[in-house]
Amino acid sequence: MLDSNPSVEQAERSGSRDWLRRLGRLAAPFIGLFLVLGIFTAIEPGSFPTVRNGQTIAVQTVVVGIGALGMCFVIVCGGIDLSIGSVIALASVSGAMTLDAGYGPTSAMAVAGGTGIVCGLINGGMVTALRIPPFIVTLGMLGIARGLAKLLAGNQRIAPPPESLGWLEGFVDKTPELAWLQVAPAAWCLLATAIIAGFVLRRTAFGVQVVAIGSSEPTARLCGVPVARTKILVYVLCGLGAGLAGAVTLGRLGVGDPTTAVGLELQIIAAVVIGGASLSGGEGGILGTMIGAFMLSCLSAGCTLAGIDNSVQEIIIGGIIVAAVTIDGLRQRRNR
Amino acid sequence: MRTDLSEAIPSHPASLLAMRGVCKRYGGVQALRDVDLAVAPGEVHALVGENGAGKSTLMKVLSGVERPDDGTMEFAGRAWKPTGPVQARRAGVAMIHQELALAPHLSIAENIALGVEPRRFRGLGPLAPLDRRAMHSTASRVLARLGHGGLDPARRTGDLPAATRQLVEIGRALASQATVIIMDEPTSSLGRHDADRLLGVVKRLRDEGLSIVYISHFLEEIRRVADRFTVLRDGRTVATAPIEGSTDQDLIELMTGRSMGAVFPERVRQRGDVVLRVEGLAGRPTPSRASLEVRSGEIVGIAGLVGAGRTEFLRCIAGLAPITAGEITIHGRRVDSSESIGARMRRGLGFLSEDRKGEGLALSMSIAENLLLSNFRPVARRGVLSTTRMRAAANKWIERLAIRSGDPVKAAGTLSGGNQQKIAIARLLHQDSTVLLLDEPTRGIDIGSKVQVYELLDGLARAGRAVVVSSGHLPELLGLCDRIAVMHRGVLGPARDVAECTEASLMSEAVLGSDEEVAA
């Protein structure tokens, strides 16, 4: 009588553990975020928890956030894109050149996005057609895109006429013209894009196929999932994200800078991993990624306010990445 | 029958290793209850039971991975309380794992000595130089004992075939002076020839006076090698008895706890039109020549040794391996060789992989996603998935195939092998396959699940689907199929009616090739 039906009991127990595990995946980034918010509110009570600082953080989140959306797909798919920082720089240069040539901000954004798409297409194509590990392919692209950006810009910033930026400038203005928006329009666009991305990843056949490829590529192939096409599309999405992030960078700086976003790939990957993604693929989500991105910009804004040096910031972010990956490793070991 | 066997339990006075009343509980699950096991010196003791019966837990307790909650254990006359697998191995009880625990980049000698390396100048601690000569001589001595004296101990382990790697692991156990060796499904990844050799090694070790606890699903294998057996069911010892005098039927009844009139379903099937025609199929490197016709409503078996090209043959048809020659026709329409597996699926082809964990299922994904992955159309509108429809569709298959799991959102990896296999088969039904290619559909699942899979396949054939089953297990093919073709070195022989086949005839064809082939 005591243990009348062990299998049912076992099923129930592991069922509730599954639920806890899913909660745990999202709890970690939330706890991290609140920790960061709490610490800086305590250190800088006068300047950190203010509307103005909130507006700064919102704008700062946009670049990392857009990049992280695409990166989330790539990582869930079992890949990695190390070239994203360089592609952002290249896109900002190509966008600035478009403005310089007399075209409007809409064209500049389209060209920047297109630049990202082409880079993503090359990344995805190399990964699938030549079966080179994504780490190597995108490491190559990291160098190529950066070099190309410098070459195109002649090793200096490209400064288009300030008035040519047009709506792009207001798009990333941290105190928007339409005061009721509270934060930059770009931040709202990021939020909308994130919701769409989350829907695509969880609620469409394409999204589940991306997860399947990351979880077990042979299984996906066996099930008739167009593996190569899906992977290329995922890298293209990531490239598009990088391109748009480049346009946003251009709007914020007002210039196309080939040396911008150096090492940004680290922050973007960190945002995705903090958000609960596994670097071995098959796990990860958009909500977590967004929280990760938000946490990182809170961190850098807080460090700036507290007068903590950039170099120390880098050390902290490095430590957070190692911690996040360690947690992921522990989680996987426990599940095994 | 059962009571007779149960009375044989009282522990051997001369047992080398004995467990009495061992209990182990994981949270709410009682994995072992009052388990008794007595292993005599110099015997091969088979441990059998369905998956989940508690065999692995028992072995973990014996080898010190887990500590029992209750009960006593004795080894060589003393209380046995191992603190871990390494300590257990040094004390004389070694475990050979299902998944081999060898470092592929190290040499045979280094692997055998791993953890107990002979060193010179011991005072230097971990920096002490290895005594390579002693390592090599130990390795050679041990390999000779295993009947493989010719093997060079300096060879890299990763370059060795699976069967030889297994010998290296057994060698490691011998090198540490183990007197009890526990083998967990040692032949599950080996071909017939290698399995035979391994059984020879087991007998040889027994004759040297070692005791071997032998876990296996293969009853014929147990019959060939074991002296006595113990059956576990639901964490309890059901019986211990000499293997001589017990029939397979007895063992199956003891394992499953129910009488099984027949393991295989009766064959009353209606053969229809030819739905799959393969002509002169060749791939790289195998098959080299394969032709087959399969009609609706029949089950056709593909027999052959491991490595004969059975898997590649099915993968070529499924579109997972490139073909260099030949023609495939499904439902009367020719398949273009460049047609993707997805396109072939839409024509009604379904393929079940032999590698369930690596390819068949995405273990970290949910049961529902695994079931529906190959065909989201019924649960999606314009690419947008409906969670309610996904759940409903998954529940339908869970119910229809009696998949014991409960919740479709649980990860597929949490299920037992048998239930996992049912999910993989259910996926083929969900994609509405009319021609099913099943590669080793019952590999690694317990007998109860096997019977269910046989019934399922029979039901599919009766419903007018065509089923092709590839298996290395001849009794299974003889019991299940209507016709059987034998693959020999990439050449597929003619499909013969099962009435014309015997285990001996199939085996000789598998080893020698078919008569027609010899004539040609």
Image (tube, coloured by chain):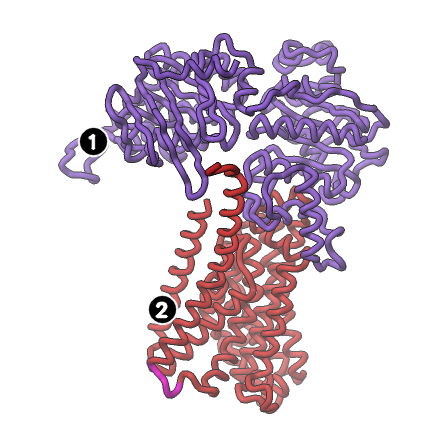
Q: In the rendered image, which residue does mark 2 sit on?
A: A316
Q: Residue A195: x percent and y percent?
A: 62, 69
Colour of chain A, in one word, is red
Of the numbered discs in the image, which one, if any, rests on residue A320? none
- Residue placed furthest toward the front: A1
Is residue B6 placed above or below A312 in the rendered structure? above
Left or right of residue B122: residue B266: right
Work out whether residue A111 or residue A233 is closer to the camera in this orientation and state it. Answer: A233
Task: Measure the C-alpha gap from mark 2 to mark 1.
Answer: 44 Å
Which chain letter matches label 1? B
Res. B172 in view: no
Colour of chain B, in one word, is purple
Is residue A230 placed above or below A34 in the rendered structure? above
Which kind of residue does numbered mark 1 sit on? Arg
**Magenta segment, prevailing SS (helix, strand or loop):** loop
Q: Which residues are magenta?
A: A43-47
Left or right of residue A325: residue A15: right
Q: Residue A253: x percent and y percent?
A: 51, 83
Going 36% across and 69% down the picture, which residue do you hit? Answer: A316
Q: Label 2 crowding class (10 Å Cα cut-off): few <14, some 14-19, many 20+? A: few
Q: Residue A288: x percent and y percent?
A: 51, 65
Going 36% across and 32% down the picture, which residue do you hit? Answer: B61
